[in-house]
Image: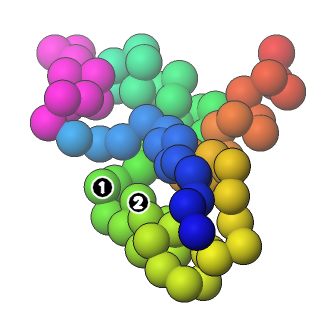
């Protein structure tokens, strides 16, 4: 029984994304950081730990009847981003 599923992570706080989350010299947030936080219903960047539960679920017997899906772990940004001006 072969399953093919995936995880679609949102914006995750990692060393790679750190420059986009740095406080600017004037004390303000980076413009991209402000954008992500304002457009994500969870109002934060994800963490690597946020991906653990979904990965464990997809690797477990609990997902035996799940096939052909992408499980988005994005704080709701995909559901929300197109709905605001």
Q: Residue at x 55, y 61 (%)?
A: 2
Asked whether, in this view, residue 50 is left or right of residue 85, the answer is: left
Residue 59: say if magenta: no
Residue 79 found in image quarter: top right
Q: Which mark is residue 38?
A: none
Front residue (pair 39, 54) = 54
Q: Which residue is mark 2?
A: 51
Q: Is residue 73 left or right of residue 13?
A: right
What's the residue at 76%, 36% (across, down)? 80
Magenta span of residues: 15-28
How would you rate the neighbour count of disc 1 (Cα within 10 Å): few for under 14, some for 14-19, many for 20 or more? few
> In 3D space, how far apart are the residues under numbered discs 2 and 1 (Cα atoms)?
6 Å
Quarter-of-image position of residue 49: bottom left
Element class at badge 2: helix
Question: CB of mark 2 within 8 Å of CB of mark 1?
Answer: yes
Does residue 75 show up? no
Q: How has the structure been colored for display?
A: rainbow
x 47%, y 43%: residue? 9
Q: Mark 1 sits on what residue?
A: 48
Residue 7 place in picture, x, y as percent: 51, 49
Estimate the x, y position of residue 53 in percent, counting from the top left: 45, 72
Q: Residues within 10 Å of mark 2 (few under 14, many from 20)?
A: some
Q: Secondary structure at mark 1?
A: helix
Expressed as whole percent of the image width and height from the top left, the position of residue 62 reads: 60, 84
């Amino acid at each position: 029984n072969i399953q093919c599923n995936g995880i679609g992570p949102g914006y995750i706080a990692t060393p790679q994304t750190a420059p986009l989350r740095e406080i600017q010299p004037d004390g303000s947030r980076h413009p991209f950081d402000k954008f992500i936080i304002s457009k994500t219903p969870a109002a934060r960047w994800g963490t690597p730990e946020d991906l653990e539960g979904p990965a464990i679920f997809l690797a477990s017997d609990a997902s035996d009847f799940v096939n052909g899906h992408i499980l988005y772990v994005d704080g709701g940004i995909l559901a929300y981003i197109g709905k605001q001006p």
